[in-house]
Image (cartoon, coloured by chain):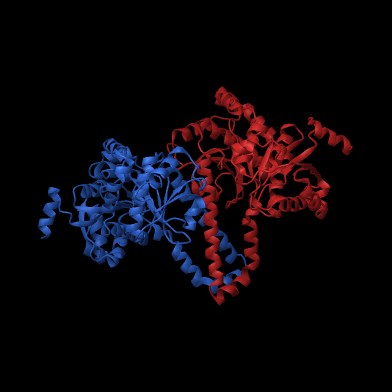
Chain colours: A blue, B red
Amino acid sequence: MNRMERSDELCGEQSESFSLAVDAMGGDGGPETVVAGLALAADRHPGARILLVGDEKRLRPLLAKHPKAAAICTVRHAPSAISMDMKPTTALRVRDSSLRLVMNAVAEGEATGVVSAGNSGAMLALAKIVIKTLPGISRPAMAAISPSMKGDVVMLDLGANVACDWRNLVEFAVMGEAFAKAVLGLPSPSIGLLNVGAEELKGDEKLRQAAEVLRESPLSNQFHGFVEGHDITAGTTDVVVTDGFTGNVALKTGEGTMKMASGLFRQVFSSSLAGRLAYLLVRPALERMKDWLDPRRYNGAVFVGLNGVVVKSHGGTDAEGFASAVDVAMDMVTHHFNEGIRDRLTHMTSLTGSRINAEGERQSVA
Amino acid sequence: MNRMERSDELCGEQSESFSLAVDAMGGDGGPETVVAGLALAADRHPGARILLVGDEKRLRPLLAKHPKAAAICTVRHAPSAISMDMKPTTALRVRDSSLRLVMNAVAEGEATGVVSAGNSGAMLALAKIVIKTLPGISRPAMAAISPSMKGDVVMLDLGANVACDWRNLVEFAVMGEAFAKAVLGLPSPSIGLLNVGAEELKGDEKLRQAAEVLRESPLSNQFHGFVEGHDITAGTTDVVVTDGFTGNVALKTGEGTMKMASGLFRQVFSSSLAGRLAYLLVRPALERMKDWLDPRRYNGAVFVGLNGVVVKSHGGTDAEGFASAVDVAMDMVTHHFNEGIRDRLTHMTSLTGSRINAEGERQSVA
């Protein structure tokens, strides 16, 4: 059986035998972090079948050290790896990199999704070329989950598309809604369009047009309208849609502000003897808060809108963080994330017209 | 003497006898908050001379209650007021509103600056038409001070210009630098351009072009290059330059995140008896932190790039917040903020070329 599978892989037939293809060579921690992360993930997803792609000589001893990871992994050797600072255009020319081979595995139907902690730019470029966008989607977007006062919120795009038009924003809304369903388990997620004010006349033409299309779409009941920066952490909507430039700035501004707040509170507890005593009193509550805000819990930005699940783990994460990225990917695989988008798009295209489709075709060829 | 001044005012001659013209009718708190705020400001700026414009019948009894405010104020009656939800285009047609009269006072050289807690959109529109932009500046921007781990940071634009080109961004850099000098007292403020990455190739054309112009300008030594969202609270640069859409979203996202962080910490201290005990131990340190983050300390967004100082107080602020807005305006008046911009522009126009000037002329006529 194992033998047969192996020959399937070599022939590149549509066997779809793996849940995920994992790039072992990406990220600052390299294969050590990836394999340790897979050992943690194995506990949570005992049924997962992972195609682990990378330098076989380095992977074998690591799997021997982590038998739990070994139990769910099949190793495939990749002769080269994409460095963290390689330009996407250069990365595209490397045919035998671990990142290329995991993308190939999805394109050829061997695996349903990909996880890598590697170079984001290269990952997006390869995913677009090898896995390709879903029919009806002009451009993939980067989505992530972030905390709010009312629960987790899905935000996209976070930087895949610096410039966007109204069609892109409408597609992001469709993909974000499907993502919130699959990963947050919400039956009917609400959607907000990020703007400088909540009034209908605020913002530029592309925002007003996207809002108009969404108000007349099958998503109209879930479309809240415009939201502002403070609505992200207020949890006003479950999904926050924006262009990649604004989303990237908002995400990083939020992270920076949270870091400043943590620093200030650390000072309160460390600047005096009374503070250190107080710390002892509230340590359990502080630990719970820290767990809740743990960036590793939110690790796993996702490229949505592709013919497969593509999850990017933060390059600097540890094993626990990598396991979270695997969690997100497994949620998306299990809950048929892409089927959700496909269904929705079937009902949307009648409204947004053939323009979205035409744009999609052009983009995926380019 | 008083009599003569009064006649000067009536003739609208270039007497420049008032430091500030204050709109008494703006904001949720109305004249009560404004007059109470001026009483606080009078302690800090005993030499200030304020032209207080609004409904005289309401102002007289309030000034009788606040003799400190009365000591620095001269009242001018305005028959009408601009409501908080009036459209800018409608506000422009009201010739006798308190907001219009304070703008007129600056345009006619009676006062050096304006403070209002009123309708921002109407304020910007009136300021553009009545006070007009500085020569060489195509569009005014909205700037504010926000806290960072290294000290206060000036950010602009915060929403006056939803769409910007590279010239606007260069002008914002010039104005932001002058603002940081005048209000933060920094001798040589550093400047960052907000982008999705620090690398030179990140972002769109207008950002790369603005960076190129700044690198070759007299500000080149102070120009740090691109900064990201997390650099705002890290205090990487003293001035953060961005378009009005991104700036507005970043500001509100930061405020929202700080609110969420405060809420989480309140929970730590209130969810158990140990927490309440701990609170008693660290209360002084928490109070200091609260003072440091007090949004009232950061009240006073400023419209820069106009032929006068124009400070917008938050509509929902209290007397202390209004006094802070007066502080900012007085700092700008005292430190000759606009002269700083004018000097810099003289040295910049040779570089950015006549295009900026031409654009400036066109805009101020429009």
Residue at figure coordinates x 78%, y 34% from the top left: B16
Is residue A277 something that shows in the picture? no
Task: Specify the quadrant of the image occupied by residue A318.
Answer: bottom left
Above or below A363: residue B267: below
Left or right? Give the position of A163 relative to A275: left
Left or right of A297? Residue B73 is right
Inspect this view and state whether residue B179 appears.
yes
Foreground pick, A331 / A216: A216
Residue visible at 28% across and 45% down?
Answer: A127
Split into 4 quadrants, where in the image is the C terminus of chain A? Answer: top left
Q: Quadrant of the N terminus of chain A?
A: bottom left
Residue A218, x across and y down, in percent: 34, 50
Q: On the picture, is A282 further left or further right than A33?
A: right
- Residue A151 x %, y %: 43, 61
Q: Is residue B217 above or below residue B186?
A: above
Q: Position of residue B91 (x, y in %)?
A: 63, 39
Please give the count of numbered marks on the rendered protein.
0
Q: Nearer the viewer, residue A121 or A363?
A: A363
Q: Position of residue B356 (x, y in %)?
A: 57, 26
Q: Residue at x 53, y 44 (%)?
A: B247
A210 on left or right of B120: left
Q: Nearer the viewer, residue A230 or A26?
A: A230
